[in-house]
Amino acid sequence: GGGGGGGDDDDGSGSDNDGGGAAAKRRRKELAEAEDELGEVAAAKQDDEHEVVRERAEDELAHAMLGAYGAFVVRLCRAKHASLTQRTVRAPAVLTLCKLMCLSGEFCGQHLSLLYSVVANDADHVVRLNAVIALGDLIARHPNLLDQWT
């Protein structure tokens, strides 16, 4: 009995050595997979942080642009005075309005009626055409806002 037990112990230790090698390989593989997952998680977190910073910078830029130029551009687009209705003033003003509307959904929603008024009523066909073309950009940028107008 003692010798048989010793033989079993030898076989067990031999199996443990083989199993230990296989177990070590499995552990190394599991560690490598865990490191890969951690690397992916860290990269995703970094991407998320970059996205937040980019969005914040974009919002700040939009607010600065709107604050600096929004009211002025809207006044130009609403103007009825002959000197302000010339194509050289009106066309760039309407295009600028559209670009500012692309920056901010809130600004866009506030001034859609003005833009559609330009499209429907402006005496200059170039100004109307530019506004219609810019509507394509607005539809791509703020589809839900323009849905009610289609």
Image (cartoon, rainbow, N blue to C red):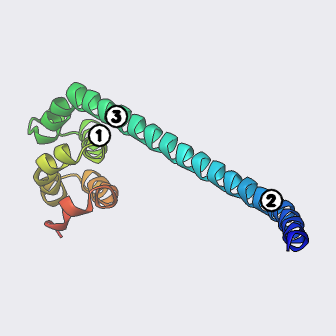
First in sequence, mark 2 or 1: give its number. Answer: 2
Q: Label for residue 146? A: none
Left or right of residue 105: residue 54:
right
Question: How much space separates mark 2 and mark 3, taking CA atoms?
Answer: 53 Å
First in sequence, mark 2 or 3: give its number. Answer: 2
125 or 19, nearer to the observer: 19
Residue under the image location 44 percent in, 38 percent down:
49
Residue 96 in picture, x, y percent from top left: 29, 40
Disc 3 target residue:
56
Left or right of residue 50: residue 38:
right
Kind of element beneath mark 2 = helix
Kind of element beneath mark 1 = helix
Left or right of residue 3: residue 139:
left
Disc 1 target residue:
96
First in sequence, mark 3 or 1: give its number. Answer: 3
Disc 2 target residue:
20
Left or right of residue 54: residue 28:
right
**Residue 95 higher or lower than 123, as above or below:** above
Q: Nearer the viewer, mark 2 or mark 1?
A: 2
93 or 1, nearer to the observer: 1
Sort mark 1 into few (<14), some (14-19) or many (20+) by Cα contacts within 10 Å: some
Give, as a three-letter code, the residue at label 1: Thr
